[in-house]
Image (cartoon, helix red, strand yellow):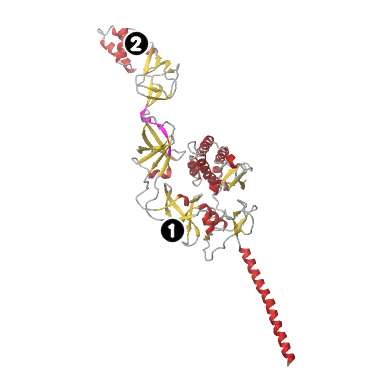
Amino acid sequence: MKKFIIYTGILIAGLLLGWLFFGNLSNNEAEHNHSEMASENQMWTCSMHPQIMQPEAGDCPICGMDLIPAEAGADGLSPNEFKLTKNAMALANIQTSLVGNGSIEGNSIKLSGKISENEDANVVQASYFSGRIERLNISSVGEEVRQGQLLATIYSPELFSAQQELITASSLKESQPALYKAVRNKLKLWKISDKQINQIEASGKVIQNFPIYATVSGTVSEKLAEQGDYVKQGQALLKITNLNTVWALFDVYENQIELFKKGQEITVTTNAFPNKEFKRKVDFIDPMMNPQTRTVDLRVVLNNRNGEFKTGMFVEGIIENISSDSEQKLSIPSSSVLWTGERSVVYLKTNPNEPVFEMREVVLGKQVGEQYEVIDGLKDGDEIVTNGTFTVDASAQLQGKKSMMNKDGGKTVTGHEGHTMDMMTEKVDFNSTVEKSFLPVIDAYINLKDALIQSDVSLASSKSEALRKALEEIPVSQREQTHNYWSILHKISKGINENVSLEHQRKQFQMISDKLIEMVRNFDEVNDKLFVQFCPMADSNNGAFWISKEEQVLNPYFGDVMLKCGSVKEVIE
């Protein structure tokens, strides 16, 4: 009995020890397996660049900081939805707003233009008889002339003979009055005044070099003849412009034409007088479109008696309370829209209480100020991203969701340098003729980039003008096949001129770079190897891309301040 009790005790003790030992081991294995599964699903991000998402720990490919664990994705999301962390929302300053009906906020449009002479006030001073210019009293364009001022003297064989006829006929005016009258009328046809005719008749002497007097007062805007030239009857000598009034000619793009009408009030400003505003009415809208720029001229007449406006001066016009029609439409800020080819997309916040987003394609109407009318794709009350849209799009791409260049969604893979790349991107087709036409545009872009590297405002302005000319060399038929890229590039390039700051020029250059990179990525062939380079410090630490033909990084956004800041992110061959 004692042995039985002892054996029973030993058995119980063994079972207890076995349970304690093997049970703990099983739990540890379960916990270990769970930990391994969690580790496999763990994603890592950068606290400074939350768009970076890596499957393992390491350094941020942008700034080199240590990556930190990212929050796990939320369950219950639809296949097209994705979630951002609150930390990422705060760091990227992502803001949203509700879409609503009603009048468009900030419904004003800014137009850029130049001062031009008032063509209605132009007068061409011509010679009314043939002859040789013996003396021209106007030495250069820009001289002021007064009505009745001596402009030139002309020797005319025809006029010389006619004066002799007058002197002869004057002695016969009693016996042959008809002949005398005919000779006088002949001189009048050459715009010889009665006073001049009477002077010739009274003196009995022929004027060898006949004077030409100004018929109007104004400024000489063009010299059409030089001293010593032989001119024919009716040939123009000078172009005289009255600059008491001038025209401000503004460019209106094709998709904006319906927004403007004659009589609208416009506020005109100029860099020469930044604190002065000139309120005028729209005087005329040209019915003929410029086929190269796809714009029409909107004209405003400005009083210039004080000489404040100079021809060629850049001006800006602002028209308030613009509306395409009386119907109320949905409107969204331009900052919320991303373009790729012919598609326009926004990011919809699908959960009002959580940072959950989804890409939404929209159809847009007219741009009014900083707003777009929405024709289709959104409804009243939708909440969309209005600031930090590119960051949200980057997160969508990295998580394999529908995005701007990833129409159908898809997995992402890790690149050889640690940054992620899309496996699937939308292909925008350009025919080979369009691609060849854009090669000079790429060359002109490279020259503009080099000017910004030198931080030279004037040089950048001239290179931007060369870029516009390269764009305008592309035939209209081919521009229409660029999926709106041509018009966007042409419009943005106008913002790079010598009347703006270097900072503004670089901001416009960034927009040009983004669009051109989108295009070139879809080209089947390029002449040179192109390097897509990236600076994380540009655009207020949001980062900015550009194209270079050299692998060496020379930063156009900072110049000598941070010349070597950046890295090559992509090579296009």
Front residue of 426/500: it is 500
Q: Is residue 409 above or below residue 274?
A: below
- Residue 283 location (% of width, % of height): 35, 37
Instruction: Say which quadrant the C terminus sits in.
Output: top right
Q: Is residue 138 above or below residue 253?
A: above
Q: Is residue 558 left or right of residue 382?
A: right
Secondary structure at badge 2 equals helix
Residue found 73% across the figure and 90% down from its top: 4
Q: Is residue 570 visible?
A: no
Three-letter amino acid code at the position of disc 2: Gln
User: Residue 121: which quarter of the image?
Assistant: top left
Front residue of 439/161: it is 439
Neighbor class of circle 2 (other Cα within 10 Å; few <14, some 14-19, many 20+) is: many
- Where is mark 2, residue-wise? 163
Q: Is residue 245 above or below residue 175?
A: below
- Where is mark 1, residue-wise? 382
Residue located farthest toward the right when viewing the structure as drawn = 3
Q: Is residue 446 left or right of residue 152?
A: right
Read off the magenta span: 112-122
Q: Is residue 526 visible?
A: yes
Asked if residue 395 lies in the magenta stretch, the reply is: no
Residue located farthest toward the front when viewing the structure as drawn = 2
Three-letter amino acid code at the position of disc 1: Asp
- Residue 247 location (% of width, % of height): 38, 33
Asked if residue 117 lies in the magenta stretch, the reply is: yes
User: Residue 40: which quarter of the image?
Assistant: bottom right
